[in-house]
Amino acid sequence: MGMTLAEKILAAHVEPEQVHADQFIEAAVDVVLANDITAPIAIREFEKLGVARVFDPERVVMVPDHFAPNKDIKSAEQCLLMHQFARAQGLTHYFQVGRMGIEHVLLPEQGLVGPGDIVVGADSHTCTYGALAAFATGMGSTDIAVAMATGRIWMRVPETIRIVYHGRLRAWVGGKDLILYTIGQIGVGGARYKAIEFVGPAIDSLSMDGRFTMANMAIEAGGKVGLFEVDDITRAYVDGRTLRPYHVHRADPDATYVRVIEIDASQIEPQVAFPHLPENARPVSQAAGVRIAQVVIGSCTNGRLGDLSVAANLLRGRQVHPDVRCIIIPGSQQVYLDALRQGLIETFIRAGAVVSTPTCGPCLGGHMGVLAGGERAVSTTNRNFRGRMGHPESEVYLAGPAVAAASAVAGSIAGPEDVLS
Amino acid sequence: MKLVGRVWKHGDNVDTDAIIPARYLNVSTPQELAHHCLEDIDPTFADAVRPGDLIVAGENFGCGSSREHAPLAIKGAGVGCVVARSFARIFYRNAINVGLPVLECPAAVDETEQGHQLEIVLGMGQVRNLTTGRVYQADPYPPFLMKIIDAGGLVPYTQRRIKDRET
Ligand code: SF4
């Protein structure tokens, strides 16, 4: 029987190498990840298991990114606990502040993840690496503790939804708009417990950055993983970068899909998801005029160089509206450096934006841009749940970097064309 | 195991930021987290909840982040079980792993109101609404999950397997 891409990758990690949807398997994992919020619980549970060492110190990755650089004493203690564990276990990939980035920008960038890998992370957006055709999925700290100890994880093989994007993208439309539109169509539970395969002509020409953005938000439709096939764009990204050999798998032509969705991508406008669910997506033309107090451009969704370039193209020679705080957060030190070399950072500062060191920060209402009651923000992050960016009475509107930058200039939700004209 | 408790009713898509807002994630014990459980959607809950109370909710309960702090906060608040029409994948897994009972039982959810009394027989997946007298059957756990539940969570389950491998 034919297998989907998700089944193919999982099958390569079990004996015998055949799996089918709904089956419970125990698979070997290639990389295990935790961050400053989830690692403390994972470490506590790991210690209960009575195992002295992690299964492989090169494959357990820890990143202080959520509340780092430490925002308060309690956060500092969580980061310290994680750092001490990393040192005691001799972890090769602990990223101290200064070398750090937002985990899901950092791991692919540093070559720690490659096609065909199974990656489990104590962070729901671990699914980002699906862009590289890695079966990458988020889990809780206890699962991660067991994976750190044993190098194995139990999983239920998911069914797959195949989403085909036809046509060419319009100007200023990127991966964020495609995924917001898609979640708007299928809902925040539309892919619950399922894998997604993103395919079609519009995907073939999408940049790696755009694919990371889409895979990142598979979880916002309830998905377990959002996968892309390996092509020349993938190879150009991973060749010379991944630290381990990688494996290219393809879905069989006779694979079984639980649902196939066809989307005419040429009809999609830049999107905005209204509070308080990512499924509340609308074309920006139907969102215009909502007054905002803050714009955030960054996060594991849209904190890569391509995202910052789009924002800079709109902010160059323009000014952030005087009532708006525009906060720009490069996703990693490398992204920061590249943006600096390309002059993007100067563009942002001249436009009246603030540029932060890499951190999750405002994405989860942690620090570096928390909202007051009644304030609204346009954000390139991935969640607009109530209270996500601060006060429970604040509001987050999700968008791509083009709409976010245009809105920063306009002082209210605006499309790029509104600012250019 | 039989649970009897008073119901706190919620709608669809109760997300993990609602269950435990990220601003409190700089701590991780169930007791500390419990003080802020569901705070942004029901500020009275953390003070008013009594040990053994039950949460009944709609579709996709626990959607969003992977934070295990969410089931820990609910468990720390003393909630005996969450009954929902459906659960988000990571939350469901986390709940099983940390030993917070969760049941999928759409019919019971639809006919249960805030303040009703429920009696739940966990092993059988039976939900009895003591206020209305109606009885429901929850979806059974897959046999694989039953092994983890019977062991008392993923850590004891794994401890046992590690020991078996060594001997
Ligand atoms: S940037 Fe936001 S969504 Fe991404 S890992 Fe950090 S907190 Fe999570």
Image: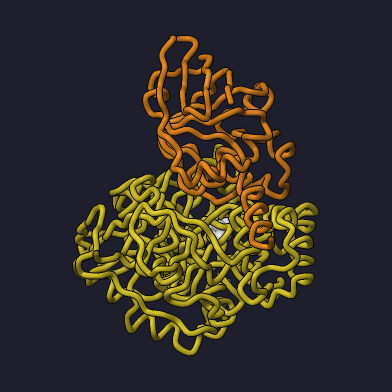
Where the N terminus of chain B falls, by quadrant?
Answer: top right
Q: In this view, does A70 lie above or below A133?
A: above
Q: Is residue A95 left or right of residue B56?
A: right
Which color scheme did the rendering employ for the protein? by chain
Question: Which residue sits furthest bottom?
Answer: A240
**Which chain is in yellow here?**
A
Whether residue A372 is visible here, answered yes or no, is no
Q: Is residue A110 left or right of residue B36?
A: left
Figure quarter occupied by ligand 1: bottom right
- In the rendering, at what x and y percent does residue B123 appear? 52, 30
- In the rendering, at what x and y percent does residue A85 appear? 76, 65
Where the C terminus of chain B falls, by quadrant?
Answer: bottom right
Q: Quadrant of residue A331?
A: bottom right
Q: Which residue is drawn at 48% across and 33% down?
A: B103
In the depicted view, which residue is nearer to us: A208 or A349? A208
Whether residue A244 is visible here, answered yes or no, is yes
In the depicted view, which residue is nearer to us: A55 or A101? A55
Q: Is residue A126 above or below residue A340?
A: above
- In the rendering, at what x and y percent does residue B57 appear? 46, 30
Task: Find chain B in the image and tell me its colour.
Answer: orange
